Amino acid sequence: MKTTNGNSLTRRKFLGATGAALAISGCSRAETRETQSKVRIGSHQSLATIDMTYTFKLDRTDPHQLHEIWDDAHVLAALQGWANRARPTIYQFFIGGNSGGIDRFWWHWMRGRNNWLGKAAVQPSKTLRDLILEYRHLVRGLVVYDEHVPSTSNVASTVAGVEDLLPIRFDPSPKSLFHFLTKDIHGPRFPVHRWLIHPDGAPLFTGRGVIPGTGTDSTKSAKCDAYIWAKELYLDTGRCNPAKMGYYMDAYWLRKPSGYIPNNTLSNHDYFIAHRGFFFDLDPWADETPIDDPHQPLGTDQRTLRAILRSAWNQTQGERMIHIGGFPPWNKKYTNYPGAGGKHGGVATEWEYAYIVTCFNGYMDADALGLGAMANASLYQHYPLKQSYPQKFPTKSDLKEWKFLAPDGSVADKSYVAIYVGDYDSAAWLYQMLPTMWTDPARGSIPLGWAFDPNLSDRFAPGMVYARDNKTPNDHFITGDSGAGYLNPGALQTPRKFSGLPSGIDTWRAHCEKYYRLWDIKLTGFIIDGDAPAMNSQVKAAYAQFSPDGMVPQKIPPQGVFDGMPYLRMGGLSGNSPSDAAENILQETTAKGSQFRIYRTVLKTPTWHKELFEILKKSAQGSRIEIVDPYSLMLLLKGYYHG
C-alpha cells in the first residue's frame, strides 16, 4: 500500500480475491539466521504434515466453529515454532485457495526436483489433536489468554516462544481446544504455566491501578497494559530476541472474521516464535483512539509502540537492525477503510508506521493484506544456502554491442525504459506470488527487474533459490524498498523524530552489505522516503557503498550521480491495463535526446509486461524507445554524466 509521485498503488485490491486467484492445484535465545547451521535432511529423519484447510469449511457464524478456526491455527503456529527451531519437523498445508495450493507447490518442489526434503519419511497427521499428542514431549505447558482483551493473544505468542508453551484462549466449554489440552481424559492434560486471565475467567488486565506483576502504573488501557507487562518481563530483561518482532493482528479478528481465513496471519507466527520474538498490534497514530480500544487516553497505543521499540533498541544497543514481520491491519483497524474506525488513509498509516519503526532501527518484512498470510517459515529458515548467488551484469561492451553507446562512448539518442517489478518487500507476498510469476509463459521474453528484498531469505530462502535456479537471461534481480528491508532511510539520520536516538546509518549499511553480497545485488530498485526527511549525504554515501550500481528514491532530484552511484527518481504508472501504462510512458517520452526512466508495477505478470512493451514498440515513438533492464539503465545514466 504505497504511493509514488501521486500514483496510488494499493495492496487492498487483492484482499477478496486472494484465495481463488492463488489456488495452485497439485502443487535459550533464538538463534539468528547467520549463526544457524545449514540443515540437510537425511533418510533417517521424518517430517510430520498436517492439512489445515478443513478450517475453510467451518461456519464462522457459529461461535464454537469460529473459535476452532482461531484456536487451532494459533496452537499449531507455536507447535511448529519450537518443533522446527532446531531442524525441519512439521509442515502444514494451509495457504493458497481451498487446497492449500501454495504450501503444496513449495512442498512438491522441495521434495521433488530440489530434493532438499526428498529423503525424509513423511508422517501425515489426521487431526491437529493427533499432532499435539505426537509432540506432547516438547510442550512444557500452556499460556492462557483472554479473548476479551484481544492483545493478550499476541502476548501469549511472545510467552510461548520464550517459555515453550502452547498459547490457548480461555474457554472451559467441553468442546473447546482449551478443554482438550487441560482436562479431557483423552488429551495431554498440560499444566498452565502462565495465566493472562484469572483462572475463573475474570480479566487480569483491566486498565486500572498497577499493571499486574509489575510496579508500573496502568496505562489506563487493558490492551496496552498487557503489552507493557510483556515488555517488562520479557523484552527489558533480555529473555526475548530483541531483533525479531511480529506486528500481527490480535484476537480482535474474532470480532471481524470476514475474508480469507489465513489472513488472520496466525500461521505467520511460527517463525517469530521459533526465534523467541516479541509480538504486538498497535495503532501508530497519536491523534486518534483505535477502534479496538476506543476509551484509552489519546495516543496510548503509539506511546506503547515506542516504548516497545525503545526497549528492543536498548537490548541491541543500536548495533543490530530489528526485523519486524507484519503490517498494519488496515482493513480491520487504524485506517479510514470502511469499518476500520480510523481517520487516516491506508498509505498515510503505512508511512507513519514506517517512519516510527525506522527511528528505532526497525525495518519491515511487510506482510500486508491481502497477501499477508504465510506458513512454514520456521521450517524454511533451515534451507541450506550457498556462499553467494552471482548475477551477470551488463558491461560497456554489451551496451556498445546493443548500439546503446556510440563508438566514441557517448550514449545514443534514445529513450531508455526499465521496469521495477514489485512489490516483494514481504516474504508472504513472495511466497504467494512467485509460483504464478515464475510459471508465466512470457517470462524471459523481455528484460525485467525483479525487486525481491534480499532479507526475505531469512523466512523464505527456498523461494529465493528457486527464482535464481530458474531464471532466464532477461530476469535481473534488484532490491525492493528500501534495500534489505523496508524502512525510510531519512529516519536513520539525526535528529530522529520519534526516538531521539543516535544515527542508525552505519548499522543499516552493515546489515545491507551482508544481504547484497549473498544475493549479488548492486542496485536498490526503490527507496520509500515516505514522510521522513530526504536522505542526507551520509545516508547517500552508505548506499553508494552497498548499492554502487544505483538507487531509485522519492525525495531526490530527477536524476544524477552521487559519489559514483547513479540515481533516478521513480516514475508512476496510471491505470491497470498495459494500454493505460503504455499511454502514460508515451506521454513522458521525449522526441529527442537521451532519456532515462524507470517505472514501478505491482503484482503484474510477465505477460502483462510483454503486452505493455509490444504496445510501446508499435507506437509512433517506438523506434526510439529501448526496453532495458535496470542495471543497463543505470549504467547508461552514469555514462551520460561521466562518459
Image (tube, rainbow, N blue to C red):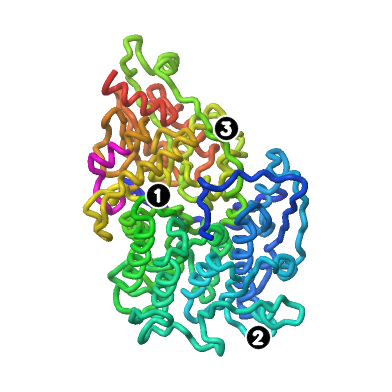
Q: Amino acid at mark 2?
A: Ser
User: Depth-wise, is mark 3 or mark 1 nearer the camera?
Assistant: 1
Q: Which mark is residue 471?
A: 3
Q: Amino acid at mark 1?
A: Tyr
Which label's residue is closer to the chain start, 3 or 1? 3
The answer to whether residue 480 is left or right of residue 390 is left
Name which quarter of the figure residue 572 lies in. Answer: top left
Q: Position of residue 462 (x, y in %)?
A: 60, 44
Residue 559 in view in this figure: yes
Element assignment for label 2: loop
Look at the image and give the residue range highlighted in magenta.
529-542
Q: Position of residue 580 (x, y in %)?
A: 42, 41
Q: Name the residue that disc number 1 marks.
A: 486
- Marks 2 and 3, the one that precedes in the sequence: 2
**Is 190 on the left or on the right of 638, as rendered?**
right
- Identify the mark nearer the N-term, 2 or 1: 2
